[in-house]
Amino acid sequence: MSEAQTMSATTAPTLQTTVPAGTRLAARLRRVARHLPHYLLLSVLAVLTVYPFWWTLVTALSTTGDVYSFPPPLLPSDPGLENFIEVFRTINLLAFFKNSILISAATVAGTLVICSLAAYPLARMQFPGRKWVFGAIIATMILPAEINFLVNFITVSRLQLADTVTGVVLPNLAGAIGIFLMKQAFEAVPGDLIDAARVDGANEWTIFWKIMLPLAKPALGALAILTMVTAWNQYIWPSVVMTSPDNFPLAVGVKYLSGAFSFKTRVVAAGAVLTILPILIVFLFTQRFFLRGFDGAVK
Amino acid sequence: MAQSRKATLTAYLFLAPAIALLLVFSFWPVGFGSYIAFTQYNLIEAPQWVGLDNFRELFGDELFLISLKNSALYLIVVPAIQVLAILLAVLVNNQLPGIKFFRAAYYLPVVTTVSVVGIIWNFMYNEDGALNAILRWLHMIDDPVGFLTDDRIALFAVMFVTIWRGLGWYMVLYLAGLQAISQDVYEAATLDGANAWQKFWRITVPLLLPTILLCSVMSVLAAVKAFEEVQIMTQGGPFQSTYTALYYAYEFGIKSLNFGRALAASLVMSGVCVVLAWLNFRYLQPKNP
């Protein structure tokens, strides 16, 4: 709805739906033509962000020719999947893949459980210390989190969790942003529903489980996707915790590939493509969570 | 009374897992880390109190001073990101056909793992890579530029990757800020005969100030703590020209297990971050007329 507000006054989608398709296309083309300079600028900037990806994909798919040639090829020469097969032969990509899935799944599941559990009393219950607890949670966003990983490395080693999935996952579960997101979702649930449930003798757990969680599904979904992408992409922390290469997630494993086989540019490129492909697919299908997720957040 | 005590207990039972995790992994690091900064600690023997020794060594270490200087230099990315992200946000804040494609294209680097970003930019920056090829073709250079191997350029090359990687994220924040501005204000200005330029400077920028504040604080802190790009692309080199303060802490902590020195460096960085965040709030806070 906020997007509709920003539309230029000359276009009215409600009118367009009543005219025949051919005219509609013409109108659309006219609009595109009128905004040609705008599109030109948009495209130049898009080339800046997309071209490096495209180059990598083309290189990964090419099987012949120089890796670096000028002008850089826009399409692969002799396209084939040999480089990708080579990646599988060189590193244990399937194991990395499995580790990534394990870490991401555990992070998502744990985050959803812990953040929604914590958010419910903060949103819907009155108890002493409520403001303090919430303040402390928000304060963790301001604490120098990048510095945490030094001490967390010590803690994880002490807890005998080094080189384990638990060690990678545990510090990430109680994120302030997740708690905040779920708190807002729970606050939006009508109070009458809860009162009615209380009258019927439901306890807090039943209310949480049977009313709150089902009604907060969209927020849970959004949090799940955001957490998944973050967990899949994290690099420093797993590379610190995981010491045996068999336990590396993809993001760490691909770096290993590029270190050991830096001379095989095409293979490294194929490894990079394979690493981002799953998350790219997730992103393309759930774009709105990323690109519109902040509507209303900044006021 | 018993009822309310039970309610309190219930509330804290719900909160218990989150509180436990935050205590261990968010608050403990700050406390224990501050203590370790004044000790000698290698993870094996018990920490030994050494007072201010770590800090004295730190400021006597030329490498740390270089790191601080590089971290300060890194702040150049802050204004660059704001200008570019606002430009992107204004460009994609409309309903033109295909605009969703462009939004996705600008956001693509944000959802890419940093290790792959490093690999891709190593390709781009290669002596025979695309960037050198294009610069040669434009006759801007004769010999290839060693983007990551020339100590005068490497830091800026790494900084560019930081901008490239973060732009889409800030664009989305600015987009949300733009969409929160009421169209009535623009319409009123149009009636008063304001042109697009005037509307941008007199309406968009002032009303966007809260978002600019948020984004500049975030990007200042991110710039001071720049680390991943360095760890992946240059490991501090060539000739220590891309050492940043947090990379220094990482090298001394995780790599050399000299946690006292590493956490002293981290503590200094935390102090710098707090001061910079405060300065931002002090000078960018929207002033009420």
Image: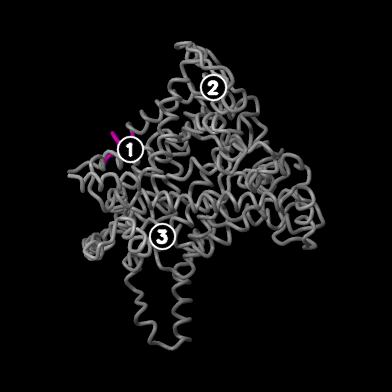
From the image, tell me which residue sits under label 1: A136
Q: Secondary structure at mark 3?
A: loop
Marks 2 and 3: same chain?
no
Q: Position of residue B1 (x, y in %)?
A: 17, 44
**Chain letter behind tag 2:** B
Find disc 3 in the rendering and name its residue: A292
- State how far apart marks 2 and 3 are (Cα): 42 Å
Residue segment shown in magenta: B280-285
- Residue B281 in magenta stretch: yes
Mark-to-mark CA distance, 3 and 1: 28 Å
Is A234 or B207 nearer to us in this picture? Answer: A234
Q: Is residue B183 above or below residue B207?
A: below
Residue B132 in percent (x, y) is at: 68, 44
Secondary-structure class at tag 2:
helix
Callout 3: residue from which chain?
A
Residue named by callout 2: B259
Nearest to viewer (mark 3 / mark 1): 1
Q: Amino acid at mark 3?
A: Arg
The answer to whether the residue labelled 2 contacts the one labelled 3, judged by CB atoms less than 8 Å apart, is no
